[in-house]
Image: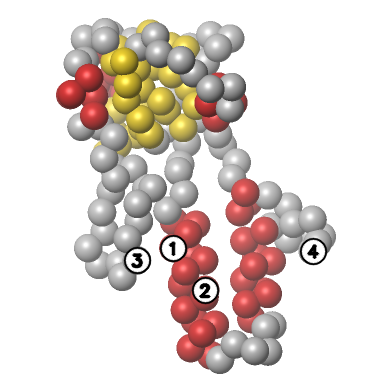
Amino acid sequence: MAEFLIYNKTDDWMNAPSKTSLGMTVYDRNQVMIDTNPTLTTAQKIKSKELLSWKRAARYQPGDIVEARRDGGPRGRLEEEVFAFLQVPDVGLKAAWGYCVAKTDPVSKYPITRRRKYFVDMAGLGLDVHKNAPLSGPEFLSRVRTK
């Protein structure tokens, strides 16, 4: 039996409101800080903005399959805040690891290591108090999508 950790957080730190610049998100504030930095050359500003955009693109998205492990293992306190847990008895652990691969983009000059290839459609998924959801193999496969 495999247990999948599904990223279940809808907000991320780049979309959070900035504490120092009211009315802006952290991402927008970082963009402005790069633009207004007098010590950076134009080429350095372009590279810094590319890296910031790459970092934003590489973040986990809601529904991403982050990890697969044996069901019933210990869970960290913070895991329950961020992840939903899907128990799928029909999928073996080796087969489950195949859903945890990162999506590669051969065109990009920066490797995106956190963007996941597979995600789970979480709409209508009945999670209990501990964010668990037991699914059958066919039900799990009907919810898995590729990006």
Question: What crowding class fits label 1: few (fewer than 14 Cα within 10 Å), some (14-19), or many (20 or more)?
Answer: some
Query: Which residue is disc 1 drawn over?
Result: 54
- Sequence-first tag of 2 and 1: 2
Q: Taking 28 as reference, is 59 left or right?
A: left
Looking at the picture, the colour scheme in use is secondary structure
* Dot 1 and dot 3 residues touching (CB under 8 Å): yes
Q: CA distance from mark 2 to mark 3?
A: 13 Å
Q: Amino acid at mark 4?
A: Ser
Question: What crowding class fits label 4: few (fewer than 14 Cα within 10 Å), some (14-19), or many (20 or more)?
Answer: few
**Residue at the spot 32% in from the left edge and 21% down from the top edge:** 69
Query: Which residue is disc 2 drawn over?
Result: 49
Task: Inspect this view and state whether residue 110 appears.
Answer: yes
**Residue at the spot 42% in from the left edge and 28% down from the top edge:** 6
**Pick the front one: 124 or 39:** 39
**Residue at the spot 35% in from the left edge and 12% down from the top edge:** 71
**Pick the front one: 38 or 62:** 38
**Pick the front one: 39 or 122:** 39
* Dot 4 and dot 1 residues touching (CB under 8 Å): no
Query: Which residue is disc 4 drawn over?
Result: 21
- Sequence-first tag of 4 and 1: 4
**Residue at the spot 52% in from the left edge and 15% down from the top edge:** 131
Q: For residue 10, what is the image quadrant?
A: top right
